[in-house]
Image (cartoon, grey):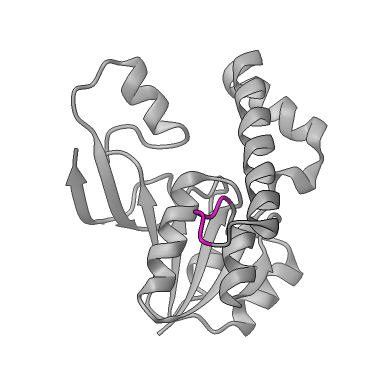
Amino acid sequence: MRIVFFGNNYHRLSVACLEAVVDTGHEVTLGAFLPESSGLLNTARVAFQHGGVGAVARGGLRLFRARLGARARSVTCSACAFSSLLEIANRRNLDTVDVTHVHRAETLEALRAATPDLIVVAGFSKILKREVIEIPRIACVNIHPSLLPAYRGPNPVYWVVANGERQTGVTAHFIDEGIDSGDIIDQEEV
């Protein structure tokens, strides 16, 4: 099966899910979203709008730690855990498509050329439009870190903690044109 995986380059959920998908043995092409490619100031502005100064500081610290870890692994410890999607792609010789601007004509052309049977999405911060959803032969599937329909949209883990929930989980669901509104495939409660 040919799988295109969409994820956010330094997002922990994306990294863990990509490793799991690659380990299935199917042919995988990585579609990496690189938020920093839109400029660090723009990335900081968006983080500030969503979570204030703390979100900017935490995001900058995560990015710094991830890049530092990637640099250290390239020099010393190749067995250490991966910190970015591109690092996994390089180590496992995966083809990549930059999906930072997922609805641009050149990105859509590259995705169609990959002829995927399935698109798997995890930790991807863009909403997919019909033109992308219809590319794979079988379906587009999202891995969402909450028990949908609760906590749809961005930052579900934050809202679970902020609201003092005693349980949450992970949902696999089909992607439709809504926001985390497609039919649920499976859920795991924690």
**Residue located at (19% from left, 29% from top):** 167
Residue 86, given in percent of the width and then of the height, sits at 64, 61
Residue at x 20% of width, y 50% of height: 187
Counting from the top left corner in percent of width and height, residue 186 is at: 20, 56
* Residue 129 seen in render: no
Q: Which residues are magenta?
A: 79-83
Residue 82 lies in the magenta-colored region: yes
Evaluate whether residue 103 shows in this view.
yes
In the rendered image, the quadrant that contains the C terminus is top left
Could you tell me what secondary structure mostly forms the magenta stretch?
loop
Is-magenta flag for residue 50? Answer: no
Instruction: State the residue in front, 185 or 160.
Output: 160
Indicate the position of residue 117 as horizontal and vertical percent values: 43, 81
Name the residue at the front extreme.
76
The quarter of the rendered structure image containing the N terminus is bottom left
Task: Give residue 7's quadrant in the image.
Answer: bottom right
Relative placement, left or right, of 164 versus 49 is left
User: Relative to 73, does residue 2 appear above or below in the rendering?
Assistant: below
- Residue, x 56% and y 74% (percent of image)? 92
